[in-house]
Image (cartoon, rainbow, N blue to C red):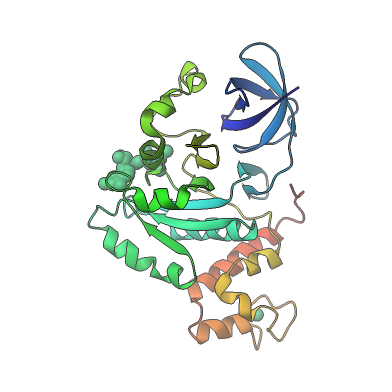
Amino acid sequence: MHQGLVIETQRRHTVVQLNTGERIRCLSKGRTLQFACGDTVSLTRSNDRDGVIESVGERTSLFYRADAFKEKLVASNVTQIACIIAPLPVYSDELLNRWLICAEASHVKVIIGLNKIDLVEAAATANALARYRDMGYDVVLFSAKFNDAPMRERLMGERSVLIGQSGMGKSKLLNALVGEEAQRTNEISMALGSGKHTTTFTRLFTIGSDATWVIDSPGMQVFGLAHFSRQEIERAFPEFRDALGQCRFRDCKHLHEPNCALRAAVADGKASQERLSLLRKFCNEGEAVPHYQRH
Ligand SMILES: Nc1nc2c(ncn2[C@@H]2O[C@H](COP(=O)(O)OP(=O)(O)O)[C@@H](O)[C@H]2O)c(=O)[nH]1
Ligand SMILES: [Mg+2]
Ligand SMILES: [Zn+2]
């Protein structure tokens, strides 16, 4: 039995890097065994290049999305979620909120990276992000093309996953950090002919010493939060935290109930109506699904 780190997850196979640096293309033993980039796994080798993943080690964190029908693991054992957005193409503010909430509810640090600040349209986007700064989030302005330093600084020493819609510049940032050369050395993907420009799979790169991880993921247009309870979702909104438990009714859904502390927070200007609407929406998603098995 060998131990290794999952560094690439494709639809049909997974690439595991052994401590020796060797890369093994693996199939999973059973359909129920789920893993993601960043997982430590035990595997048996079938030959020089191939193997079978037998089990997954304990995790310090797990970042994944879920709807009523299925769940999709994104990254394991990360210390930080880096949400990457850009002025162009237009990003989805609701998706950004989903990542923020998922990170909070998963107890993983989260930062917002606004890429392409070389574009004139970036000024308006930066202004729109001020409200996230007010909530306490670190909003990092950078340009993967011309100056990645502000982002690089946040990523060094952390184990991060880059999350974002397609076209935001995640792969460009990764290129700037590790160099295209390093990415090309992943001969297993090359052998399978996945050298396309759009990222279709998740892959992990280490920078310098192995302390720094950057995981690049494919663009995500949906991100379900069905695996979190109402309480977990509510607590994931920092600006509403003081108001939690202060509503007149214990089971307040923060809709039309009298003396709702969350609605009062909005009326007092401590929180926005948009975020309260998102809170209600995300809570309903979770409650549509009775119980998810926790990983
Ligand atoms: N102007 C500008 N374009 C960028 C920047 N970063 C990435 N791009 C462009 O945005 C497009 C999408 O980048 P890519 O890294 O593939 O995005 P991904 O889908 O998030 O991985 C490419 O055409 C990049 O050249 C930047 O800082 N400034
Ligand atoms: Mg990409
Ligand atoms: Zn309420």
**Horizontal and vertical percent for residue 279?**
59, 68
**Residue placed furthest toward the front:** 209
Q: Residue furthest top?
A: 47
237 and 207: which is toward the camera:
207
217 or 5: nearer the viewer: 5
Picture layout, residue 93 above or below residue 54: below
The answer to whether residue 280 is seen in the rendering is yes
For the point 39% across and 58% down, the residue is 140
Residue 255 seen by the camera: no
Q: Position of residue 146 (x, y in %)?
A: 27, 46
* Labels in figure, total: 0
Figure quadrant of the N terminus: top right
User: For this rendering, which residue is in front, 39 or 101?
Assistant: 39
Please state the horizontal and vertical placement of residue 64, each as a whole percent of the image: 62, 47
Left or right of 247, for residue 128 = left
Question: Is 49 left or right of 191, judged from the image as shown?
Answer: right
> Which quarter holds ligand 2?
top left
Residue under the point 46% across and 24% down? 194
Camera-side residue: 67 or 205? 205
The structure residue drawn at horizontal position 65% and vertical position 69%, both measured from the top left corner, is: 235
Q: Is residue 262 above or below residue 275?
A: below
Q: Quadrant of residue 239?
A: bottom right
Picture quadrant of residue 14? top right
Extreme-left residue of the structure: 120
x then y, percent, for residue 193: 45, 19
